[in-house]
Image: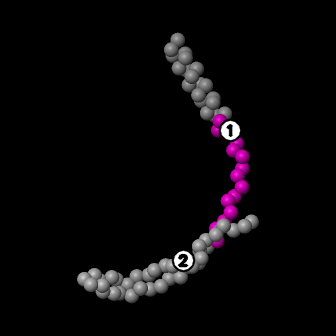
Amino acid sequence: MHTVFCLVTMCLSVCACSTLSSVAEPERPAPPKLTQARYRTIWVPDKIEGDRYIEGHRVHIIEEAGRWMSK
């Protein structure tokens, strides 16, 4: 009896899963696109501050952040 109950439960589970996967999700509209951010890059030269040596490096400064585009 217990085996029959387990088999019936497994069959119903498989059938339920297959019916759920056949239900199509509604199609979502594509999200709006983002504009590319505008930025500038500056070079900071090597420098010594006290007992620290700071190697030259680039610094990127965002001038205008990206924005959502209207359709």
Q: Residue farthest to the top?
A: 1
Q: Residue farthest to the front?
A: 50
**Residue 39 appears at what percent x and percent y?**
55, 79
Task: Answer above or below: position of 60 versus 30.
Answer: below
Quadrant assignment, res 45? bottom left
Q: What residue sits 65% from the left and 38% below the top?
A: 21
Per the image, is 29 magenta?
A: yes
* Residue linked to disc 1: 22
Q: Secondary structure at mark 1?
A: helix
* Residue linked to disc 2: 62
Q: Secondary structure at mark 2?
A: strand
Q: What residue sits 59% from the left and 73% below the top?
A: 65
**Residue 63 appears at what percent x and percent y?**
57, 79
Per the image, is 1 magenta?
A: no
The answer to whether marks 2 and 1 mark residues whose Cβ atoms lie closer than 8 Å is: no
- Under mark 2, the amino acid is Ile
Task: Answer above or below: position of 17 versus 52.
Answer: above
Magenta-drawn segment: 20-35
Q: What residue sits 67% from the left and 59% below the top?
A: 31
Decide which of 22, 71 is in the foreground and name it: 71
Q: What residue sits 69% from the left and 39% below the top?
A: 23
The quadrant of the rendering that contains the C terminus is bottom right
